[in-house]
Amino acid sequence: MKLAIITERASITLGGAEKSVFELAAKMALLGVDVKILAATGAAQSQRVKVLCSGSDRRVALKDFKESLLQHFKENHYDIIHSTLPFDFADVYQPRGGSYPEAAARNAASYKTGILRIYKLLTIFANFRRTLLARAERKLCKSETGPVVAALSEYVKSQFKKHYNLPDERIYICPNGIHLPSLEKISKADKLQAQILAKLNIKQADEPVFFLFAAHNFRLKGLASLIKAFAVLNNRLTKRPAFLIIVGRGQTGKYHRLAKRLNVNNRILFFGPATNLNDLLDIADVAVLPTYYDPSSRFILEALAAGKPVITTKFNGAVDLFTADRHGKVFDSPDDIGSLAEAIRFYCTTENLTAAKKAIEDDDIKSKVSIENHCRKLLTLYDAIIKKKAEK
C-alpha cells in the first residue's frame, strides 16, 4: 500500500499534532506500508518526508500548497491520501485539532470574563487563515463525495455531527495513540525527584502526592482552575499532602501571582519546559489536565501509558480510552472548581492511588493508547476505501 500523509509543516518541535504525524508515519512503515509525508514547509528529515514548497520558513498559502499537492499527485500514485488539512481531494481527513468551529468556541469559553468571552465569540473567524480552513472544512463536509473524517474520539465525532450534520457513514472513529517509550530507556527520575523535593522544601518521608500538569497554552488547558482547586484543598484535610508540578512553555507571571494570592505557592512548582516528559511521569502520581478543549490529549495518553491515573474534563476526547472512577476522574467543566478539588483529594490516599494504578495495568490501558492500535484502526479504514474504489 502506498500512503501519502499531508501535513502543513514537517517539524516535530512545533507541537503534539506534528509529532503525531511523524509517529504515525514511522509506525505505518514498520507495519509494511510505503508511506510519504507531504508537507508545505519544514525539513526533509528522512526519505519519508517530501517538502513541496521549500524556500520559505513562513507559512505557505493554502491555495499554493493545494496546487503543489495536485501537481505532485499527477506525477505520483498513492493508494490512499490521508490529510490533516481540509482538502476535498483526500480519501481521509483527520483533523488533529478537532473541528474549527468547536475549537474556536471552546477557546472563547476559556476566557474568564464575560466581556472577553463574548468578544472572542464575535471575532472567531477574524483570522483570515482560520477562516479559509473553516470554509474548506465546511465545504468538505457538505460534499457528498468528500473524504471520510477519521475522528480521534467520540468528542470529535460529535463535533462534526453538531456543526455539519455529517452522517455516521462519513465518520470513522480512530482513537488517538502515542509512541510507547522503550522499556530500556534510561530514566533520570531519581535525580529529578531529589531536585523537586529540594525546590519544594519537602522530604520523601512527608509522603507527598505529585500531580503533574503539562501544557503550553495554560489558559486553554485550565491552569487557573487547577491553582484555585489547590486553594480549596488548603481548607480540607487530606491523608497525604498534594503538590503540583507545572510543565510547559506558557507565560507563568499571572499564575505565580494567583498562587501567591491564594496562598498555595508553597505547594506549586513551575518547572518550565521539559525535554523528557517521561521522566516527570515516572515521578508523578497523577496527571491532571482540566482542559477547556482537547480532541484527545497526548499528555493524558502518555500518563496512562506510564500507569498513572488521570484527571480531566469531558472536553477531552482522551476520556474514550479509560474508564472514569476506575482509571481516573472525569468532571464536566474546568469552571467546576469544587469537583476538580474533590478529584485531587480522592488521590491523596495511598489506597485510591494503588487501586487506580492496578486497574490501569490489569486492563492493559497501555496497549489501548498505543500508536500501533491507532494505525491498525486506520489500516482497516484504508482497506475499506481501496475496496470501494475497486468496485467503482
Image: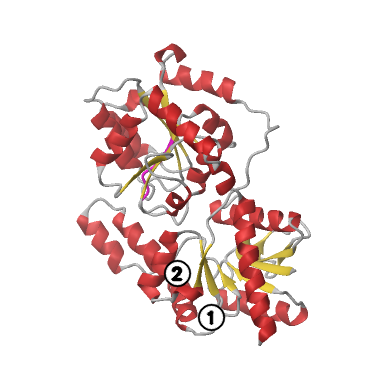
Position in image of residue 247 (x %, y %): 47, 37
Q: Give amino acid for label 1.
A: Gly
> What secondary structure is the stretch in magenta mostly built from?
strand
Highlighted range, magenta: 287-291
Q: Element type at marker 2?
A: helix
Q: Does the segment drawn in magenta span residue 375? A: no
In-image side of 166 versus 29 (left or right): left
Local crowd size for mark 2, using a 10 Å CA cut-off: few (<14), some (14–19), many (≥20): some
Q: Is residue 45 visible?
A: no
- For the N terminus, give its image quadrant: bottom right
Name the residue: 33% across, 38% down: 226
Task: Check the image and tell me how it is coloured.
Answer: secondary structure
Q: Which residue is mark 1?
A: 146
Q: Which residue is mark 2?
A: 130
Name the residue: 31% across, 41% down: 224
200 and 204: which one is in front? 204
Position in image of residue 279 (x %, y %): 57, 31
Position in image of residue 387 (x %, y %): 67, 77
In-image side of 268 versus 141 (left or right): left
Q: Element type at marker 1?
A: loop
Local crowd size for mark 1, using a 10 Å CA cut-off: few (<14), some (14–19), many (≥20): many
Does label 1 or label 2 sit earlier along the sequence? 2
- For the C terminus, give its image quadrant: bottom right
Q: Does the segment drawn in magenta span residue 289? A: yes
182 and 44: which one is in front? 182
In-image side of 75 versus 211 (left or right): right
Q: Give amino acid for label 2.
A: Arg
